[in-house]
Amino acid sequence: MEIRKVVGQVTPEERAEIQALFERKNGLTELAKIVSADNTELYEKLVKDMGETGTKFQQWWDTKSKKYGWESHPKGNWEINFETCEITLVAQE
């Protein structure tokens, strides 16, 4: 059973930060589907950028969860509503 619970909210500026990272991460994922490992230079740049973006994405969640003290769950993750800036805990029971 899935549990969904609003656990906090971020500022519009903070939302803009994670939204930019989210969009970049998705764009890089799509690009990875079409870039061949044969194109070594582009492939290596893509892999590096994906790693750096993924790290920044996770750091944003870690920093904000600590700052705001969001409730967490061992089998859960947080989601953001980009329209309302609300943070929701999504967990499996």
Image (cartoon, rainbow, N blue to C red):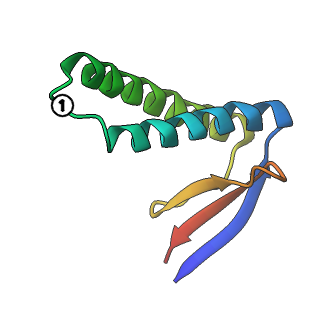
Q: Nearer the viewer, residue 69 or 16?
A: 16
Left or right of 33, for residue 23: right
Furthest residue toward left = 38
The residue sitting at 65% across, 33% down in the picture is 20
The residue sitting at 71% across, 34% down in the picture is 67
Residue 29 in sight here: yes
- Residue, disc 1: 37
Q: Nearer the viewer, residue 11 or 82?
A: 82
Q: Nearer the viewer, residue 93 or 48?
A: 48
Residue 72 in sight here: no
**40 up-or-down from 2: above or below:** above
- Residue 40 in picture, x, y percent from top left: 19, 20
The residue sitting at 50% across, 39% down in the picture is 27
Furthest residue toward top = 41
The residue sitting at 69% across, 30% down in the picture is 17
**72 up-or-down from 5: above or below:** above
Q: Quadrant of residue 14?
A: top right
Q: Residues within 10 Å of mark 1 (few under 14, many from 20)?
A: few
Left or right of 93, for residue 38: left
Left or right of 38, for residue 27: right
- Residue 7 in picture, x, y percent from top left: 73, 57
- Residue 1 in picture, x, y percent from top left: 51, 83
**52 up-or-down from 5: above or below:** above
Name the amino acid type tagged 1: Ala
**10 up-or-down from 20: above or below:** below
Left or right of 57, for residue 17: right
Q: Nearer the viewer, residue 72 or 57?
A: 57
- Residue 80 in picture, x, y percent from top left: 69, 52
Furthest residue toward bottom = 1
Q: Secondary structure at mark 1?
A: loop
